[in-house]
Image (cartoon, grey):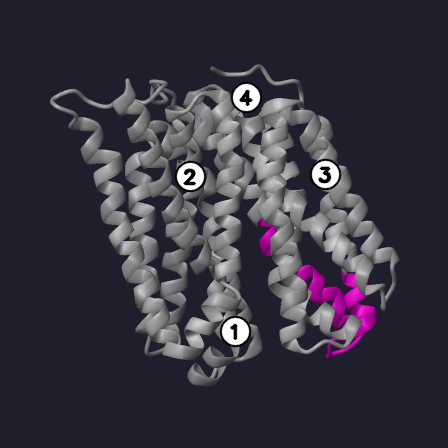
Amino acid sequence: MQGRNNYRWFLFITVLLSYFLVVIQRTAPGLITETIMKEFQLSASTIGFLSSLQFIAYAALQIPVGLLTDRFGPNRFLVFGVLINGLGTVLFSTAGNAQVLFASRFLVGIGDSMIFVNFIAIISQWFEANTFIKLLGTISIGGGLGSLFASFPFALWLAITGWRHAFLISGLLLLLLAGLSYVVLIVLPQKNHGKPIKPTVTVQLMPKSTWHILADLLRSRQAWATFMGHFGLVGTYISFIGSWGIPYAMVAFHLSQAGASQWVMIGLIGALGGGQISSWLASRRFTARTLYRGMHWLVFVAWVSLFLSGTHPSFALTIVLLLVIGFGNGASALTFAVVRQSFSLEKVGVASGFANTGGFLSAVLLPSLFGAILGEFSSHVTAIGLHDGLLIPVLFSAIGILGSSMLQIPTPNK
């Protein structure tokens, strides 16, 4: 018993480290946008598509990955995801033309799509429900630290060694972690002095056909509620921070690019606290559903306040609002607490994938819709255009409120 308890924490740390590195590769290429444009002679629209390609692959594969996870188990898919992510990152570092760049980022997106859903499925099997909710906060911190490392620390690494060397080392580290994950998730559970190490809960793999599983999911009010809830919390934050946040800060406050980057980091700090605090509250004092609804209203009010503050808002006010919006993104981990409580363990993979699709669908849609509103005013970035573009995250966060209001009281799964 003690050996199994020690092993499951070693397993959790190994997968968390993989997730940390994968999150870095999700966002770090944004640091070298201008370098890539010059080196490969790419237009702004082409580089924009390159940036979104990874998220398109990620969002498109969430439901298929969830289905495969529930049918065949999460362990091998997670290992394969880390491996593909590492191969894509190595390929990116050695790219000699634009075609290889696109192929490499698509590979990274495929690998990334297999990490989080399978991570959720694995800890659902190895930890009890209450511990699972607490660990969601730790996972959120791991992702937040990955995003933070992908800003100033990674930029410093790029400045010292050059972008190819930094991404090559990152890719090789991911390949090493793929090997370690294979040992921890597949080899060691079968070898424990001749006795297999088993998870806390034994999950029966889904016997139904793919179409029956999908039909059940699409008829589920709870599934659509988590889809819409994740849509409202995740994409609004990721897309704004990663696409229009820095231009907004530069125009609204007349900041340099470096100063605007520091402004954006306020949201990342909020996200670090959001996951841990909300998960702790959900496991101690509040139901996940009640807390989840409250977070959606908090984020909606923050986006509305940012819009109503006009084209030149108070800097201090935006700091508070950005912290709240970042906090809400961290609290989006509660989506999977609700999933864990609402669906049988045999369906956690596909239900998690469906909910996660909502979050990253909004991450794909928001930059282009925001840009379309901006383009209505001028071919250049303007204060009025940036201000009116904030209507998109306001609308998206309202969809999140609608989703959270649709949630029914879940029946906890042991």
Give how far across and how far down residue 294 sits, in percent: 74, 33
Mark 3 residue type = His
Between the residue at mark 3 and the residue at mark 1, the CA separation in whole angstroms equals 34 Å
Q: Is residue 372 magenta?
A: yes
Point out which mark residue 341 bears. 4
Residue pointed to by mark 1: 46
User: At numbered mark 2, what does the secondary structure look like: helix, strand or loop?
Assistant: helix
Residue pointed to by mark 3: 296
| 10 horizontally vs 400: left or right | left
Q: Quadrant of the N terminus?
A: top left
Camera-near label (3 vs 1) is 3
Viewer can see residue 216: no
Give whichever of 48, 311 is nearer the camera: 311
Viewer can see residue 110: yes
Circles 4 and 1: CB distance less than 8 Å? Answer: no
Residue found farthest to the left: 194
User: At numbered mark 3, what does the secondary structure look like: helix, strand or loop?
Assistant: helix
Residue pointed to by mark 2: 64
Which residues, given as a range, are shown in magenta? Answer: 361-389
- Residue at 18% x, 27% y: name it: 190
